[in-house]
Each structure stands twice: as C-alpha cells, then as structure tokens.
Amino acid sequence: MFTEIPPANDAAAGRMTISAIAASIGVSVPSVSKVLNGRSDVAPATRLKIEKALQEHNYQRNARQTGTSASPLIELVFHELDSAWSIEIIRGVEHAAKRHGLSVVLSDFGGRHSPDQRWMDDVAARRPLGVILVLSTLTPAQRRQLDTRSIPYVVLDTDGETQGDAPSVGSNNWHGGLSATRHLLALGHRRIAVISGPQDVLCSRARVDGYRAAHSEAGVEPMADATRWGNFTVDGGYRHGLELLTRPDRPTAIFAGSDMQALGVLRAAREQGINVPKDLSVVGYDDLPLAAWVGPSLTTVNQPLLEMAETATRMVLDMARGIDARPRSIELTTELVVRESTGPAPQ
Amino acid sequence: MFTEIPPANDAAAGRMTISAIAASIGVSVPSVSKVLNGRSDVAPATRLKIEKALQEHNYQRNARQTGTSASPLIELVFHELDSAWSIEIIRGVEHAAKRHGLSVVLSDFGGRHSPDQRWMDDVAARRPLGVILVLSTLTPAQRRQLDTRSIPYVVLDTDGETQGDAPSVGSNNWHGGLSATRHLLALGHRRIAVISGPQDVLCSRARVDGYRAAHSEAGVEPMADATRWGNFTVDGGYRHGLELLTRPDRPTAIFAGSDMQALGVLRAAREQGINVPKDLSVVGYDDLPLAAWVGPSLTTVNQPLLEMAETATRMVLDMARGIDARPRSIELTTELVVRESTGPAPQ
C-alpha cells in the first residue's frame, strides 16, 4: 500500500521565504522580489546570485494571486509564424483557452529556437498560468527560471532532442512516414524519393526512419541518393522536387515533409510536364485544409494539429492546478488520407 | 497662426476625480474603481449608473501606470480566425509589436462581429496600450467604455458601415475590383461573373462596384445574373463556381472575392473538365503566398495585409502616446498581379 510521507525538510526546503533567501545572500528583499517579477532594474551580478539562491533553496512562488480580475493568461510561443500550419495550432489553443476562460498572448521568436531574456522577463512579470512552446526549446537555465516562478510549460512538437522530462505533445511521425511509404510501395512504386525537414529536427528524422522501415518491411532497397533534408516551405519542396525530377533515373513517387513542400513538388512536376498521378505520385504531410482543394488534391498524412494544440493547453492547465501531467509526453496518432495525388506506379 | 487655447472648463470637465464621480451618484469609490478595472463584482444597475456618470463627466483615466515591468500589451481581435489570410495579419502585427517592444494578446470572437462583456472586462483589467479589431465592430456603448479607460482602438478592414469617426486601416477594394475587371475586359472577356463576400460587408460591395465601374467604362453590359454573394472560403468559391460553370451560357471569366474562393473555382473547373486559362480565366483577391504556388498560379489583386497590419499597430501606438492619428482612415493601394490563371477569351 502506498502511503504518502511528506519530506522531513519540507518546511525548511520548500517553504523558505523571500526574506530568508534575501538574508542568506545579503541582498534586499525588494531585489529578490524584482528578480522574481522579471524587472530588469537589478544589477546582472546580483540577479545571477539571486537566481542561484532561488534554485538552491528550491524556492517556488505561490500560485498566482488574483490581484486582477482579467482572465488568466496563457503564453503561446512560435519559433516562427508561418502560413497555414501555424494558424491550425493557434486555433486549437484559442478554442481550448476560450473554453477554460483564458486569454492567449502570442509571441514569435523570429526564427530563433530559444527565447531571449526580454521574453523571460515579460513572462515573469505577466505571471501566466502556463506556457506552450511550438518547435522551441528552453535552455536548462530558462527552465529553472520558470520552475522557481511556478509557471508550467509544455512543448508542442519538439524541435530536437527530447528536453529531459519537459512535458510535450507531438504526433507519431515515424508511423506517418511508415504509412505514407507503405501506401506508395503497395501501388508498385520502387523509386521513391523523400524530402523532409531539417535533419536536426526530430520529427524530420522520425519520418525518414518510417520511410526506411516500410522499405525494409517490404524487402525493397530505398532508392539510392534520394533523401533530401531542407525546410518545410513550398519553395524547399519546389527546389528539391525540380532537382529530383530532372535526374535521368527520376523517382516515380515523392514523399514530402509537409503539404507546403508537396505543393512545391506539384509545381516542379507541372513545369517539367510530368503528370501527377499518372507519371508521379506525391504524398504530403499535415493534411492542412487546403490539401483537399488544390489540384490534384493531396494524398497526405493527417497530423491532428488542432487536437495537439488543445491537448497541450489542457496539459498546461492541469499542471497550473497542481495536477501532475502523466504521461508527460503524449504522441497523438497520425493517419494517411488518400486523395488524387497518388496512383499506380507507371509501367 | 494657430494658438492652442485650453477649454475653459478643463479642470471641471476633463479632470473630475473618481471620488467626485462616486460622490455625485452616491456610490463608493471602490465601486467606480472596480468598474474602471473591468471587475465583474459590481451589481449591474450600479455598474450602469457608474458607466453613465463616467461618460457624462467625460472622465478619462490617466495614461497607463507602469506598476509592472512587463512589455505593454496590444490586443489583436479577429471576428474569426481562418487560415492563410489571418496569419498574414498576425505576422504584420507581431513584427510591428516586436519593433516597439509590445506583446500581443490574440482573441477570436468565434464568428461574432462584436465583443462580449467578458472581453470588455478583460481589456479594462489588462489595460493594453491599444486594440486592433479585424473585421469586427464595437457597439457605441463599447466604444465609450474604451474611451473612458483611455484605450485607443483601430479597425482593420471594416466589416460594414464606417463606424463614425473610428480610426481604420483598409485597402482600396473598389480599385481592386476595377483593375481585376479591366484586365479581363482587355483580354476580350464579355461574360464575366463575380463572386464576392457577404453583401453586408463593405469591402465585398466595394469590389463588386469596381467590377461594375470597369464594365461601364468599357461600355460593356455586365453579364446578367452573374453576381454572387457568399463567404470568402474555398467551399464558397467551389459551390458558386460549380453553379456558374454548369449553366448553358457559362461565363468565360470569374472574378473571385479571395484567393481561397478562387481555389474553389479552380476545383469546380477541374471537375467540369474546363481548362484554366484556355476555357476560363480566374482572378483571385489578396495575393496570399500560396497564390504563386498553386496550379495554375493565380492572377490576383494584391492586398498589402502585412503593411495594413503594421500601419494599424503604428496608428494605435501613436494614439496611445496622445498623438492624434490623422488621417483617421487610411486606405492602402491594391495592385493586380498577373499570373497563369488568366488568358485571352476563348473564341
């Protein structure tokens, strides 16, 4: 039988007050308070000393006080806002936030994968219920800063190595790559190229691994020199597509890393007078609303972006309420949607 | 020579204190303060009385006090978040906000064109520097509530009647309709249909008027029964397109109200085996990034969404700093971009 035993040093370790911490390192109480509140008017050396003391004493600020009647905030952070993909996530978070009476602060790191100190200070001062990071990473020091301020965070679609025990919501990218490639192999394709995202982004690698696994399962050697790493944009798909489609042994199928990339491949094929799906099959990834409308409509791997965003919001809320999120990492299911852009391999 | 003369009753009218207002209607000072701060724990009747007194005495709260070190907030409000169009506006506001050290709170009214009281209370409590409303309208009472709290607002792309003297940023929709239709007439088209947005939305009407003006200028009678009102979605374009393309005297050109609608028209044409641009020319509206990538790429009217969003942000900031925005209504220029979806009228 499980019996919860409080740690013996609870009062000393967990409950140390701001004034005790200030006294322990010889700084003023307002200085500690300023650092906790994200004020920038504290000397860097003092600031560092205070952060260190807060962490050493395992200081955790009390849950948010309601000094204001405004809806609590949730922070939604993108490493970069791009077209149709981002808006699905924004909509998912907005819907979940509205249901729970929250307001959403939206930030864009302008391409950087980690926040800067200015953002950290803003968050400390705003005291949101929680933070959702999309394709972004916190440094260990930044994670500790959020911890001492009792601000929980969830990573949506991690951009690289799993971040220790950082809670995250993603989708099964490996299985997405597997099912897309199985579909193409079943249609008789034997020269299948793959265009994925950046090689250092975990989801790109997982999809390419799924592509390889499907080949191995079918006893088919993957096409030589036909894996491309790039970015998830239309332009990336266009450039890689053009290169692949103008080589002498051109592929009969291309599995793209996003619907946007697939759109670029379709354009490259049109320019080369290659008919999709008669001469070339194309599979996208994401299943954005436009995938059903472009011509030909895209066979693609559905990634439940709205649901992922809603799940991340719920998770961060649970954590804010002191409910430990278990499991801390959730992968939602991906699913192949077959439309017009794939067909039997040309004879 | 212009000399500024302060109004004689400045002290009495403009500078009435909260306690004077409270005394004048027999309520407590904290009650007035609560209403100003968007707290909901004030009886509705009292609340109403206080709002009325604030307006009668022309009360204007002092500019935002900096009790916190967080970046000032700007509120960005959509009547509804939809795919590629919204993200362009979000990006424009994010960029301008970052340049000015602001954070953005994003809200979605879920299809309603006016905010609810909950949102009004949140805004009163958050005290943002300003508000940008996209395709949304404030009721006169809501406008007065923002005025008494000294929170300026700008309407981006007004959805209907101009809102008195509400500052706004839009683009020249009438001219967009004119240039799109001139282009089609010059290509020899004489049966040109137009699909626009909702009839009660000002920009839809302006574009259709531009379409008519181009016909009148060319001495050509607009095609009979060929104006369709709907929504700006792909599905709307598809349904109207299908109906127009299956009538016996089908149009040789369609001017759509958005790129999304144009995408729907392209799909309807494909399903009917009608070649674009050989048998049918299609013009879109907006010039979203994907317009250049779809097949055929879209001839479309460029609406400078990023620039409109940046202009609205700057305008609201100027107002927050006490600089009167002149002119209060700005229309940016639209421009026709010719791509693959238009060609000479079929013989």
Image (cartoon, coloured by chain):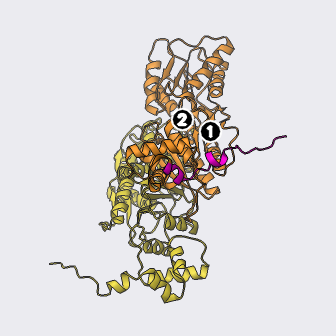
Chain colours: A yellow, B orange
- Label 1 sits on what residue type? Pro
Image position, residue A321 (x, y; %): 33, 65
Q: Secondary structure at mark 2?
A: loop
For the residues labelled 1 and 2, say whether their Cβ atoms are less than 8 Å apart: no
Classify residue A58 by image quadrant.
bottom left
Secondary element at image label 1:
loop
Disc on the earlier residue, 1 or 2: 1
Q: Which residue is mark 2?
A: B295
The one nearer the camera, B199 or A167, is B199
- In this rendering, which labeled residue sits more in front, label 1 or label 2? 1
Residue appearing at x 53%, y 57% in the figure: A107
- Circle 1 is placed at which residue position? B167
Quarter of the figure that contains the C terminus of chain A: top left
Q: Out of A189 and B301, give the one closest to the viewer.
A: B301
Q: Is residue B19 left or right of residue A175?
A: right
Residue B185 image offset from top left, x and y in percent: 64, 18
